[in-house]
Amino acid sequence: MAAAARLFRQQGYHGTALQDILATAGSPRGSLYFHFPKGKEEIGAAALSIAGEAARQAIAHAAETSESAEMFVVRVARGMASDLEKSGFKEGCPIATTALETSAQSDVLGATTRNAFQKWELEIKRGLFRFGIPAGEADLTATLVLSQLEGALLLARTYCTLEPMHRAERALKRLLRADQKTD
């Protein structure tokens, strides 16, 4: 599944053939159909679920190991930026590429990608709430944080520079400082 998730992240769902997954994973063709009798869509859903859960866990870990809402959001942003940079700007969001390609055409993949994003947003909300941001504000801010970081990640990957991620981090810090001043 890691091979499929990485390929979908780099090439998209439609740009990844089953033989690409088999070659990258070093698996025989028969094992693929044994474990995934419904084919590529089933593989896609499983790979996206695993990748989405790994990202959710990273967000939760950032909240657990941070001392403030600002530090929490910075850790999430820097983790995303680090992953992108380590991949040579080939691997952005583990969900977005496939979500953009397939959510309107595949109920299965659409549900899987929605579920991943919803879990991330909820995890961000929990982290913000943990640092004293009221539930209603945390809900709104979580959507803004996720949207800001996803957009910055797309720009950073497209521009092949982390500068959009750095700007997003600065913007989110300002937002969180402004929120704290209004409390």
Image (tube, grey):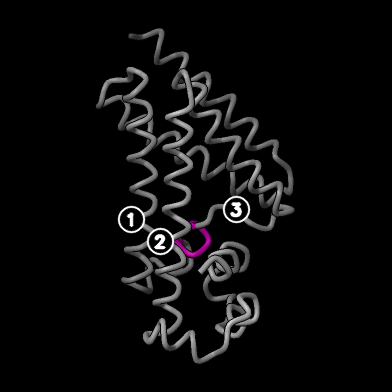
Q: Amino acid at mark 1?
A: Asn
Prevailing SS of the magenta stretch = helix
Mark 1 → mark 3, Cα distance in angstroms: 18 Å
Disc 1 element: helix
What range of the chain is rendered magenta? 95-99
Q: Position of residue 147 (x, y in %)?
A: 46, 41
Q: Residues within 10 Å of mark 1 (few under 14, many from 20)?
A: some
Q: Residues within 10 Å of mark 2 (few under 14, many from 20)?
A: many
Q: Is residue 99 left or right of residue 112?
A: right
Q: Amino acid at mark 3?
A: Gly
Is residue 7 placed above or below 91 in the rendered structure?
below
Q: Residue at x 55, y 28 (%)?
A: 74
Are discs 1 and 2 less than 8 Å apart at CB?
A: yes
Q: Earlier in the sequence, mark 1 or mark 2?
A: 2
In terms of depth relative to the viewer, which is nearer, 181 or 120?
120
Q: Residue at x 44, y 60 (%)?
A: 50
Give the residue pinned by disc 3.
92
Q: Residue at x 39, y 66 (%)?
A: 103
Q: Is residue 61 left or right of residue 22?
A: left
- The mark found on residue 115 in the picture is 1
Give the residue pinned by disc 2.
49
Q: Position of residue 11 (x, y in %)?
A: 61, 68
Q: Amino acid at mark 2?
A: Ser
Q: Residue at x 42, y 34 (%)?
A: 144
Q: Is residue 35 magenta?
A: no
